[in-house]
Amino acid sequence: MTAAAWSTWVKWNGTIEQTLIDGQHQAAGDATVADAKKRAAKNGAGGILTVDTLTDRQLLGRIWVLTGDDLHQHFGSRHPPKKAIEAGQAAFLNGLEEGQAVAVIAYGRGVPTAVWFAGQAPAKRA
């Protein structure tokens, strides 16, 4: 069985760490983040609730925060606007392996405005 892709946009909130926390609260809805994470782990679904650790390179089970050079390579600018990321997100997401996740910062007038968190869930094991 193949992995399922997931993605979500979260409004920038000062730091990538805080923006991730905000996205997890958003995904949890009315439940606590801890309860929502437990449910996500049980059903094997991928998503922003299943990854917590940010890193500067591709590692399974962690969120790769793209650097300026990475952003330029994949989206044509060190400070890509949301529209540029949206235009290239399908191809970028298809290039990720099972269990990989990314955080792509979108910019407006040179400052962060939002983050696209996305990834490929690990394949469900029979």
Image (cartoon, grey):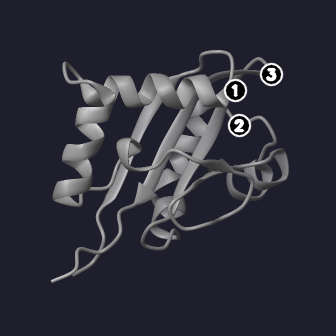
Residue drawn at the location 30% of the way across and 31% of the way down: 27
Query: Which circle's residue, 3 or 2, is located before the other in the chain?
Result: 2
Q: Is residue 67 above or below residue 101?
A: above
* Separation (CA) of disc 1 from disc 2: 6 Å
Q: 110 or 14, which lies in front?
A: 14
Q: 30 or 85, which lies in front?
A: 30
Query: Which circle's residue, 1 or 2, is located before the other in the chain?
Result: 2
The numbered mark at residue 21 is: none
- SS state under label 1: strand
The residue tagged 1 is 107
Residue type at mark 1: give it: Tyr
Q: Are marks 1 and 2 in contact (CB under 8 Å)?
A: yes
Dot 1: within a 10 Å radius of its alpha carbon, few (fewer than 14), some, or many (20 or more) residues? many
The residue tagged 2 is 80
Residue type at mark 3: give it: Gly
Residue drawn at the location 69% of the way across and 57% of the way down: 74
Q: Are marks 3 and 2 in contact (CB under 8 Å)?
A: no
Residue 60 position, x and y percent, is: 54, 68
- SS state under label 2: loop
Q: Are marks 3 and 1 in contact (CB under 8 Å)?
A: yes
Residue 42 position, x and y percent, is: 19, 56
The residue tagged 3 is 110
Question: Is 94 left or right of 113, judged from the image as shown?
Answer: left
Dot 2: within a 10 Å radius of its alpha carbon, few (fewer than 14), some, or many (20 or more) residues? many
Residue 118 position, x and y percent, is: 46, 49
- SS state under label 3: loop
Residue type at mark 2: give it: Pro
Residue drawn at the location 36% of the way across and 42% of the way down: 49
Dot 3: within a 10 Å radius of its alpha carbon, few (fewer than 14), some, or many (20 or more) residues? few
Q: Is residue 98 above or below residue 120?
A: below
Quadrant in the picture for the N terminus: bottom left
